[in-house]
Image (spheres, coloured by chain):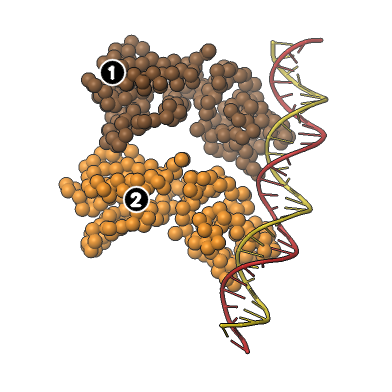
Chain colours: A orange, B brown, C red, D yellow
DNA sequence: AAATTTTTTATGGAATCCATACCTTATGAT
DNA sequence: ATCATAAGGTATGGATTCCATAAAAAATTT
C-alpha cells in the first residue's frame, strides 16, 4: 500500500469534514495531517513543510483568510480554500491574497482531490521528480512507471517519449505524423497500437478514454484533468 | 551470531510490546536494551549513549513526549515515538519538540525496523564508519564487507568503488559508461557481470532485484530504501 | 604457484519494437 | 434510416536489441 510522496494539511474546525477529507485523501495514497484551527495549523506549518494546505475560511479564532495571508508571506505553499456557500466575496478575497484555488461547501471529496492533483502537477517538487497526475494515474517518467490503484505498471522508453512530449502541452492535438517523428515511425497503424497500449496503462476504462483521446481526422490529444 | 554496531533503547510500559520489539530487533542483529518507563529510561541514557531511542508516548509517570524534550536538550540522539492510534496531535507535537519519526500503534515490527535503518543511514556514526543499510544488507565500505542474514560476505575493491559512487546519489541512473569510468573498463558485458555479482551479495532475491535495478536502455540505478 | 579477483567470451532469454491483417466504429451521402 | 467508405482499434508474430550469467581465461594478490 505504497503512498505517493505528497503531504497535505487539512484545517477545519468541523470534525466530520476533517476526518472525511483525511480518510478520502488517504485512500488515494496521500499522507494527510489535520489541524483544528488556524493556530494549530500554524504550529504544524512551522515545523513541517506540507505540499498543499486545505483551509476552511470560516473558523473560530483566526479565519482561513488571515492564515493564508500569513502563509503566503513566508513561502509559496499552495492553498485551497473551503468557502461557505454564497460567500462570493470571500472567494475573491481569497484569490486576491494568493490562494491557489477554492471550493464551495458542500463539496465532493472527489472534486477536492481533482484540484489537489491539479495544483500538484504545477509544483516544482513534482516536476523535479518527473511526476505528474493524469487522472488517477501518477506518472513517473524518471522511473518509467505508473502508479495506479496501488499497482505499479512499467512503461517502456518509447511510451515514455510520447507521454513526455504530450505532457508538455496538454490539450494540444498531435497528428500521427507528430507522434511518428517523436519515436521514428511512419506507419499509422503502428502509432495507433502504441496509443492503445498507453491507454491500457493510464486509463481506468481504456475502451472509453478520458485523458488520451482520439481526434478523428487529426490525431490524438492528452488531457490531464 | 555477530551483531551490527548499533545499540537501541526501547521504552514502553507494556511488557509484551517491549519484549516483542526487543526480540525482533535482536533477530535483526541490533543490540537492544529496554526500559519500563521514562525514569528507568533516563537512568540508562545517563550511563550509556544509545544510537536510537524508541519511546512510547503514553506511559504512566512521565510521557514519552517530556522525555523526548529532556533528551533533545542534552544531545541529538535520534528518537522514534510510538503513538496510540488517532493521536495525531501527539505525533505533530512529537515532531515539534524534535522527535525524528513516529509510528502509530499498532505497528508492524518490520515497519519500525525500516524507520530505524532509515534514521541510522543519516547519522554521523554510520557515515563515519562507512556503514549504510541497503534493505537488509548492512554495507561496510571501510571493512569491505556486508552483513546480511547473519552472514558476512566480502566485497572486492572494484565492487566497493562502484557501490561507493552509487551510494553517493541513490536513485541516480548510472550508464554503463559511467560505471566503466569508475573502474576503468569499457566492455559492457564486463560491467553487467559486476552488477550480477553485487546483486548476489546485497539482494535477498538477486534474480528480481529490489535495490540494484536495471534501467533498460540506460544503465543501472541503486535504491537504498 | 596457489588462491583470489577481474575480465572476456559465448549463449540463451527477455523486453521492446514494428508491421500487418483483420475488426470495429464514425460519418455523410443517398 | 441505410449503407458505403473512411478512420480508428487491436491481436498477433517476427525481428531486433538489450541484458543476465555460466564458464573460461587472464591478471593480480597472497
The dot on residue A78 is 2
Mark 1 crowd level (few <14, some 14–19, many ≥20, 10 Å Cα): many
The dot on residue B165 is none
Mark 1 belongs to chain: B
At mark 2, the secondary structure is: loop
Q: Residue at x 32, y 34 (%)?
A: B85
Furthest-left residue in view? Answer: A61
Give residue B79's position: percent from left, percent from top: 35, 25
Q: Quadrant of residue A164?
A: bottom right
For residue A214, above or below residue B168: below
Give residue D15's position: percent from left, percent from top: 78, 52
Q: Are marks 2 and 1 in contact (CB under 8 Å)?
A: no
Q: Estimate the spatial distance between the alpha carbons at disc 2 and disc 1, rounded to whole Å.
A: 42 Å
The residue closer to the viewer here, D28 or A83, is A83
Q: Is residue B108 visible?
A: yes
The residue closer to the viewer here, A2 or B123, is A2
Q: Residue at x 32, y 41 (%)?
A: A33
Q: Residue at x 39, y 30 (%)?
A: B107
Give residue A30's position: percent from left, percent from top: 40, 45
Q: Is residue A73 visible?
A: no
Count of residue discs: 2
For residue C19, above or below residue C2: below
A209 left or right, relative to B90:
right
Mark 2 belongs to chain: A
Label 1 belongs to which residue? B37
At mark 1, the secondary structure is: loop
Q: Residue at x 26, y 16 (%)?
A: B39
Mark 2 crowd level (few <14, some 14–19, many ≥20, 10 Å Cα): many
The residue closer to the viewer here, B216 or A18, is A18
| Foreground label between 2 and 1 | 1
Give residue C15's position: percent from left, percent from top: 66, 45
Amino acid at each position: 500500500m505504497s503512498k505517493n510522496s505528497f503531504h497535505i494539511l487539512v484545517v477545519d474546525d468541523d470534525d466530520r469534514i476533517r476526518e472525511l477529507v483525511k480518510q478520502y485523501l488517504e485512500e488515494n495514497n496521500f499522507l494527510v495531517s489535520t489541524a483544528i484551527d488556524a493556530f494549530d495549523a500554524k504550529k504544524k506549518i512551522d515545523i513541517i513543510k506540507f505540499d498543499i494546505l486545505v483551509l476552511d475560511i470560516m473558523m473560530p479564532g483566526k479565519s482561513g483568510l488571515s492564515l493564508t495571508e500569513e502563509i503566503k508571506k513566508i513561502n509559496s505553499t499552495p492553498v485551497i480554500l473551503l468557502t461557505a456557500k454564497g460567500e462570493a466575496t470571500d472567494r475573491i478575497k481569497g484569490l486576491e491574497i494568493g490562494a491557489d484555488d477554492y471550493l464551495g461547501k458542500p463539496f465532493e471529496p472527489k472534486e477536492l482531490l481533482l484540484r489537489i492533483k491539479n495544483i500538484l502537477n504545477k509544483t516544482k517538487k513534482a516536476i523535479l521528480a518527473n511526476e505528474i497526475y493524469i487522472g488517477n494515474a501518477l506518472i513517473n517518467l524518471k522511473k518509467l512507471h505508473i502508479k495506479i490503484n496501488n499497482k505499479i505498471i512499467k512503461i517502456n522508453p518509447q511510451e515514455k517519449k510520447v507521454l513526455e512530449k504530450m505532457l508538455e502541452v496538454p490539450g494540444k492535438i498531435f497528428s500521427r505524423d507528430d507522434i511518428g517523428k517523436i519515436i521514428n515511425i511512419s506507419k499509422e497503424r503502428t502509432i495507433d497500437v502504441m496509443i492503445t497500449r498507453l491507454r491500457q496503462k493510464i486509463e481506468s476504462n481504456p475502451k472509453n478514454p478520458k485523458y488520451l483521446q482520439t481526434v478523428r481526422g487529426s490525431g490524438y490529444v492528452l488531457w490531464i484533468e
